[in-house]
C-alpha cells in the first residue's frame, strides 16, 4: 500500500471512529426517561401520597386538559373524564393546576370519580387549583388567574395558576406579569407559579405569536424572580412546544420535573407536567 | 519546508489581513448596535413593564459573547470556506499545483500541510476575534457577571448566571471548541476545492452549500435531517456557557464534528491523490 492510500485509509478510519464514538455517546431513551433522578427519590415519587408525605415531599402537576378540533381550541371533553380521574387517582398528586377546566360543569363530574375526599378547590375562568392534600385558603380569582394560599405540613405556600392567551402576546404578558405581582403580594413563605403560559421561548418550532420578543421578555421577567423548575423537562404540546410551566421560589427545591407523554386523553392536546418538590 | 512555504504564501495572499479587518469592522458595527439597543431598551419606557432588561444586564462579556456568536455563525465559517476553497483550486487555477508537484514532494504531504496550515489559521483567527471582542467589551462597556436568558438566539434554555472570572474561563474554553467546530466547514470547502479548477468557484460553492446546510439545520421543518448535517453541531460551544456544563453532550457534538472533518478530508484527499495535474 502506497503512502497516499495509507493516509486515505487513516482518514476513513478516523471518520468512522469519531462518528461511532458520537453515536454511542448519544443520550439513550432510557436515560432521558430516568432524568438522572436518584433511586430513593424516584421511589418516593412513584410511591403513594402517604409515602411522599412521610418523606416530606410534594408532588405538583399542571395540566391543560382541553383540546382542539379542526384547529380551534375547546374546553375539557367529558369523554376523557374517566381517563383524567384515573390519571389523578394513579399519580396521587398533592396539588393540581388545571387549565381549560370549567368549575361549574367539569368539577362535579370529576370530583365524583376521585378517590380523595373533600379536595379543596379554587377556580376562576377556565382554570382551577385543586389541593388533594392540605388546604387552600384565601384566593384572588380574576379571569384566568387564580392565586391562593396552600397550607400543607405546617407550611404556607402562595400558589398561582394561569391560562394565558394563545393568540395575543400582549395579553399574555399582562396576564402573566400581573399574576406574578399578585402572587408575591399574597400570603405565604414560599411561592409556586404555573399553568399554561402559552410561551414557547425556545422557539424551536413555529410560534403562534406575533411578538416573540415580548414572549421572551415576560418569560425572563418571571424567571428572574422564580426558578423555572421544568426547564429541562421537554415539550408539553405538539410539535415540540413547551407551553406549560412550573416556577418555584428558593424555599421549594425542585427534585425532579418531567413531562408525562402517555397520559393525555384522545381529545387533549397537552401533556401534564409533573414536579416533585422538597420544601426547605 | 512545504509548511513554511505555504505559510509565507498565506501571509502574502493578504487573506489574513482582509479577514482581520472584516472582523474588526463587524465588531465596531456590533458595538454601535449593542449600544443603541441598550440605550433604547433601558430608559424605563412604560411598554417595558414586566421585562427583565436593565442596565446591569448589558456588559462587556454579554457584548463579547453575542458578537462572537453572530461572528461565528455569519463570518468565521465564510473565512474558513474561503481558506479551504483557495488551497487546492487556487493553486490549480494558477498552474502552481503542477509546478509544486514537479518537486520531490508527495501529494499526501502537500495536502496535509495545506489542511494543517488552514486549520491553524482558522484557530488563530477565532482566538483573535474572541480576544478583540473581549477587549472591546472591557474598554467600551466594562466586564461584569455574565447573565444569559432564553431568547431568539437560543444561547440558553434557562436563565444562567456566571460570575466574571468563571465566565472568562468559559470564553477560554470556547476558543478551542469553536475552532474545532470550524474545521468541518474548512475541510468541506477543501473537499470542494479538489473538485474544481477555479478558486472562485470553489469558495462560492462552499459558502453557498454551507449556508444551505445552516438554514436547513435551523428550520424546525427539517428536524429529521439535523443529525446528518455538520451545521447542526457547530454551535455546540454555546453549551460551555451553561452554569453546569453537560460535558457528555459537548463531547458528542465535538466527536461528530471531528467525524465530519475526517470524512471531508478523506473525500478531498481521495480526489486529490487520484487526479492528474497538468
Image: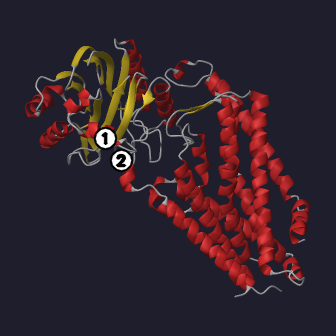
Q: Answer with the quarter of the image where residue B122 lies.
A: bottom right
Q: Chain of mark 1?
A: A
Identified at 70% across, 38% down, the residue is B64
Tag 1 residue: A42
The front one of B141 and A229 is A229
Identified at 68% across, 27% down, the residue is B144
Q: Answer with the quarter of the image where residue B204 lies.
A: bottom right
Seen in the picture, residue A20 relative to B75 is either above or below; the reply is below
- Pointer 1 with pointer 2, Cβ within 8 A: yes
- Residue A239 relative to residue B94: left or right: left
**Where is residue B89 drawn, in percent x and y?**
78, 73
- Residue A234 relative to residue B23: left or right: left
- Mark 2 element type: helix
Q: Chain of mark 2?
A: A
- Mark 1 element type: helix
Query: Can you see residue A221?
Result: yes
Query: Marks 1 and 2: same chain?
Result: yes
The front one of B102 and A211 is B102
Question: Which circle's residue, 1 or 2, is located before the other in the chain?
Answer: 2
Identified at 54% across, 18% down, the residue is B46
Tag 2 residue: A34
Alpha carbon distance from label 1 to label 2: 9 Å
Q: Answer with the quarter of the image where residue A98 lies.
A: top left
- Residue A95 relative to residue A106: left or right: right
The front one of B108 and A103 is B108
In the rendered image, which quarter contains the C terminus of chain A? top left
**Where is residue B26 drawn, in percent x and y?**
76, 44
Identified at 56% across, 71% down, the residue is A16
**Other residues around mark 1 within 10 Å, as few (<14) / some (14–19) / many (≥20):** some
Query: Can you see residue A95?
Result: no
In the rendered image, which quarter contains the N terminus of chain A? bottom right
**Other residues around mark 2 within 10 Å, as few (<14) / some (14–19) / many (≥20):** some
Amino acid at each position: 500500500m502506497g503512502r497516499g492510500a495509507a493516509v486515505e485509509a487513516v482518514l476513513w478510519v478516523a471518520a468512522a471512529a469519531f462518528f461511532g464514538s458520537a453515536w454511542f455517546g448519544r443520550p439513550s431513551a432510557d436515560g432521558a426517561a430516568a432524568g438522572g433522578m436518584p433511586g430513593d427519590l424516584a421511589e418516593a415519587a412513584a410511591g403513594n401520597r402517604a409515602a411522599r408525605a412521610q418523606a416530606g415531599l410534594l408532588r405538583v402537576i399542571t395540566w391543560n386538559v382541553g383540546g382542539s378540533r379542526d384547529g380551534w381550541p375547546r374546553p375539557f371533553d367529558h369523554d376523557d373524564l374517566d381517563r383524567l380521574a384515573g390519571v389523578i387517582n394513579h399519580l396521587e398528586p398533592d396539588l393540581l393546576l388545571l387549565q381549560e377546566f370549567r368549575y361549574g360543569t367539569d368539577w362535579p363530574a370529576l370530583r365524583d370519580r376521585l378517590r380523595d375526599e373533600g379536595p379543596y378547590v379554587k377556580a376562576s375562568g377556565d382554570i382551577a387549583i385543586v389541593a388533594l392534600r392540605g388546604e387552600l385558603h384565601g384566593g384572588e380569582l380574576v379571569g384566568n388567574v387564580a392565586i391562593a394560599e396552600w397550607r400543607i405540613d405546617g407550611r404556607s405556600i402562595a400558589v398561582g395558576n394561569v391560562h394565558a392567551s394563545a393568540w395575543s402576546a400582549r395579553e399574555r404578558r399582562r396576564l402573566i406579569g400581573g399574576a406574578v405581582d399578585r402572587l408575591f403580594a399574597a400570603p405565604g413563605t414560599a411561592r409556586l407559579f404555573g399553568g399554561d403560559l402559552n410561551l414557547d421561548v425556545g422557539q424551536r418550532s413555529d410560534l403562534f405569536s406575533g411578538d416573540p420578543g415580548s414572549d421572551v421578555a415576560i418569560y425572563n421577567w418571571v424567571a428572574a424572580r422564580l426558578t423555572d423548575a421544568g426547564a429541562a423537562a421537554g415539550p408539553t404540546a405538539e410539535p415540540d412546544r413547551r407551553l406549560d410551566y412550573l416556577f418555584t421560589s428558593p424555599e421549594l427545591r425542585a427534585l425532579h420535573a418531567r413531562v408525562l407523554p402517555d397520559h393525555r386523553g384522545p381529545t387533549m392536546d397537552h401533556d401534564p407536567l409533573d414536579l416533585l418538590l422538597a420544601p426547605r | 519546508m512545504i509548511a513554511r512555504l505555504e505559510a509565507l504564501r498565506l501571509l502574502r495572499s493578504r487573506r489574513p489581513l482582509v479577514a482581520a479587518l472584516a472582523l474588526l469592522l463587524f465588531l465596531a458595527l456590533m458595538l454601535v448596535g449593542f449600544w443603541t439597543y441598550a440605550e433604547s431598551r433601558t430608559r424605563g419606557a412604560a411598554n417595558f413593564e414586566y421585562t427583565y432588561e436593565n442596565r446591569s444586564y448589558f456588559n462587556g462579556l454579554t457584548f463579547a459573547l453575542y458578537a462572537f456568536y453572530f461572528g461565528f455563525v455569519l463570518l468565521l465559517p465564510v473565512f474558513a470556506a474561503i481558506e479551504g476553497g483557495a488551497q487546492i483550486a487556487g493553486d490549480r487555477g494558477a498552474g502552481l499545483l503542477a509546478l509544486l508537484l514537479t518537486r520531490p514532494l508527495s501529494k499526501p504531504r502537500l495536502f496535509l500541510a495545506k489542511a494543517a496550515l488552514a486549520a491553524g489559521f482558522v484557530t488563530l483567527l477565532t482566538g483573535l476575534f474572541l480576544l478583540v471582542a473581549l477587549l472591546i467589551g472591557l474598554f467600551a462597556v466594562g466586564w461584569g457577571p455574565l447573565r444569559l436568558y432564553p431568547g431568539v438566539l437560543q444561547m440558553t434554555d434557562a436563565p444562567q448566571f456566571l460570575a466574571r472570572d468563571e465566565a472568562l474561563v468559559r470564553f477560554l474554553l470556547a476558543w478551542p471548541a469553536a475552532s474545532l467546530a470550524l474545521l468541518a466547514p474548512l475541510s468541506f470547502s477543501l473537499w470542494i476545492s479538489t473538485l474544481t479548477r477555479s478558486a472562485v468557484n470553489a469558495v462560492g460553492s462552499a459558502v453557498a452549500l454551507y449556508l444551505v446546510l445552516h438554514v436547513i439545520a435551523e428550520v424546525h421543518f427539517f428536524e429529521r435531517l439535523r443529525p446528518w448535517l455538520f451545521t447542526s453541531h457547530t454551535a455546540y460551544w454555546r453549551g460551555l456557557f451553561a452554569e453546569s456544563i453537560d460535558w457528555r453532550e459537548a463531547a458528542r457534538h465535538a466527536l461528530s464534528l471531528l467525524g465530519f472533518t475526517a470524512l471531508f478530508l478523506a473525500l478531498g484527499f481521495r480526489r486529490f491523490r487520484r487526479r492528474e495535474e497538468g
